[in-house]
Amino acid sequence: MSSSTLSQSRTETRASQPPSRASCINWVRNGYCAYGEKCKYLHQTLRREYSNPSVVAVPRPRPSTTETSSPGKSSPQLRILHPPPPNKEICRNWQRRFCSRGYNCYYVHGDLKYDLPTQIRHPPPPHAGTCRQWLQDACSLGYNCHYVHGDLIYELPELEVSTPRAHHSPALPPEPPITIVIHEHTKVKIGPGFEIHELTTSVETPWVVLSHVPSRASTTLIERLLKPFGSALDIQLPPIRPKDVMTVKVRFDSSRGATAATALDGSTFLNTRISARVPVNSRSGLATIQDCSLRIEFEAPQRVAYGGYPSHERAQEAIAVAAKGQSGDYFVYATVHVGLPSIGNVTVKFTNLPPTANEDFMRRFATPEDVMWERPNYVDLKAAIAGITRILRNLGNFLELDVLPPPYSNGRIRVWASFSSATAAKSAAAALHGRKPLFVGKTRIFARHVLSLTYRVSFDDYYRDARLIEGLRESAYRKGALMSITIRRLQETMLVRLSAQGVKPLGWLKAEYEKISRGEILHRDGVPVWDFFFGRSDGQTYLRSLEAQEGVHVVADKIRRNMKLFGTPSNRAKVRTILLLKMTDLKTRQVRTIRVPGRVLGALIVTQLSHLYQKFGNGSISVNLTESTLMLLGGDELYEAAVDAVREAQQSPLAERPYVRNLAACPICFNEVVSPIYLACGHRWCRTCLNQYLLAVVDNRHFPLKCLGDEAKCTQIITLSTARTVLQPDEFNSIVEASVSSYVHAHAKEFHYCPSPDCMQIYRTGSKGTVVQCPSCLLRICSHCHAEAHDDLACAEQDGDKLFKEWAASHDVKNCPGCAIPIERDEGCHHVTCIQCQTHICWVCLQTFPKGEGIYRHMREEHGGIGLNDNE
């Protein structure tokens, strides 16, 4: 090409300079200007169109001899030189494939080439910000200015930017695993692809509680006692030591050490029999459960009196005074008495009076005209306590007696007796129950072996829930099963003791108490439910009105996306029904449709849709790319917000881009990607397809989850952050639980589920004699034979296991070499795949083959065929 032709080509690519030399503020702030070439201010990105030497003619390279070319067609090619951006860092939005500014971006794009004219060698200024004086066309320092001038080109150090492959994004640091608590007690460390890295079972804790330790024991002696079981990191003694025995909490370096230390249970330390138990993992903190106690009840020393009154009015006045509350240490009960003895016009019978009550004491009850007394059942309470202690000590393995302080409701004394083992406690209950010794006035003693769970709570927490705890106490009394709640005020805390005669009633009592202290999470079919309506102002107003009507406090947690109910069991049940009906009603809200042009719809998905999801929830907005519509489930607020979002999308630069047809196919539907999700490997998925792929794993349970690109040969693991973008919270939790279930089944020799029906807690296999306690149903489990704890008995093979082994011996049943689960083969070839751990097995020799590669060649070479009757 001649010089005149080149000059003509340059002239055609230039535009006239704008009237003003100042930069366009809209372009500097937003990266674009709607006026384009018609703007009267300077656009840095339009440098190629102004009369400035940024456009040069570069001769096109001559084609090689193998290339076909037409003679006379070697015209020069124009190459536009793009200056580097002001900021030398990689654009984060470009890494996520969200940035469409290209050379207009303030940050570096790895797939773009930046050039500098060779004749210019000006280092960049010390400050990366744009000069404000230059923006006003008032700075004349040029390259000497400490700030950037948009019309100057600076020397750029070499950027460490690697251009990615055609469909691959820059390498990102690996996603760290996160810790999730499932089933309220089990901790799971889960990484990309929902792969389990670490599982901490519900019964694992580094703490062990030593009870009935002599108060004279020092930290050094206790550490020496625990040394055979592991390293004790922390030994907590009570701040104020009692006179005789104390409770010590010890933290080991691992849960194995704490579990092993339970072997000290029932041993002798400093001539005293001690107890060692692992505390129950409770949502309300460490709760100490005991099964070595007796609850003993007997009549308090008391007497009965009959008072005479001149009229029914005076008699009712006396009964009302007695009903107001306690009189000293006693609750006095008064009723109208008919029959003998008869005193005055109306006779009132007073029971549960102190044994020392006299005429002066009776004046408080409307001053009766005359009083007749019965003899007290007995007088000396201290002698009664000493007599019971003497009997228990003679039975053996007795540790201590705890007498609950007055007032004495129902005219009964309640005491707790502790023993060194559950067996000793049961024997003592059988020996003491029903006896009528002289020191209690030959009244009957009731002694029952009970399970108890003890909580220590602060004064503020207790008085906040005192009304609800009292309501639970009444519910437990009506429910029966010898359930009770005992409350004692200590020096620094309140002690709440739950007790029941049996594991199941105690488990119910524990669950109800924790719902009071920590709240009941609203569930439907075992999954926490949530709607973004309850996180908005109108939803909060609805909840406050519901609280005023039903007396239940409702906490809507927008972060965890769940709802907690605080109140009595009956009120919670009523509010639970109301909220679930409200959830159903929210799903049937008004449906509206907005039609959106194709390119505007794409811009709406990229720039505005996530904000609408965050405010109104994913279930309220649905995008139909086939018909280019936006379907809304909600009221006027959602509709108005969606209309504003469409207007914003229309003004976005993305709406001006031409529609690209040559998109990569989705690995699921093999069509052009709709509402794309980009993975780190560069493959693009339809949002709906990725959602369905992730949900399908709940049934398939094959982890970790990997990309299906390159005909399912891509090894890129799907990150948890990507999964969260397309899954609802309950869907995400369902996949986590499926991964945990798959992990437990794949490690069947190490982990087991609690044998109680419908209990989802997990425990780890232990050595012989190791007993663990489920924190949900409170069942004590032998972790060696996986049956209910059998104290003082050897682990025996269960009858059911014997019958199964006899049946398996006569059928084609073998254990999987991967997870040890029994497998029965009834038909087909010798290639068997375990449905639990996905191990590919040769049925003849039980050899395994990763991904099944080479198994058929092995069967033909080693076993003469694949196990079918055809020609193999």
Image: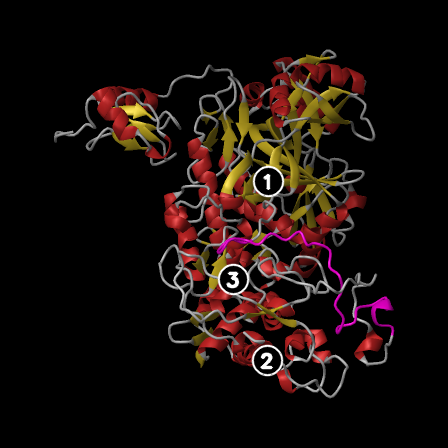
Q: From the image, tell me which residue sits under label 3.
A: 61
Residue 237: x and y in percent read: 78, 27
Residue at 12% x, 30% y: name it.
Answer: 871
Mark 3: few, some, or many residues within 10 Å (few <14, many ≥20)? few
Q: CA distance from mark 2 to mark 3?
A: 21 Å
Q: Closer to the camera, 768 or 485?
A: 768
Residue 747: x and y in percent read: 45, 30
Residue 759 visible (yes or no): no
Label 3–label 1 contact, CB within 8 A? no
Q: Nearer the viewer, mark 2 or mark 3?
A: 2
In the drawing, what numbered circle is on residue 788?
Answer: none
Residue at 26% x, 30% y: name it.
Answer: 856
Q: Nearer the viewer, mark 3 or mark 1?
A: 3
Q: Which amino acid does the dot numbered 3 rest on?
A: Pro
Identify the mark nearer the N-term, 2 or 1: 2
Number of numbered labels in the structure image: 3
Mark 1: few, some, or many residues within 10 Å (few <14, many ≥20)? many
Q: Which residues are magenta?
A: 141-169
Q: Which amino acid does the dot numbered 2 rest on?
A: Ser
Label 2–label 3 contact, CB within 8 A? no
Q: From the image, tell me which residue sits under label 2.
A: 4
Q: In the rendered view, does 474 fall on the left or right side of 866? A: right
Q: Is residue 149 magenta?
A: yes
Q: Which amino acid does the dot numbered 1 rest on?
A: Ser
Q: From the image, tell me which residue sits under label 1.
A: 484
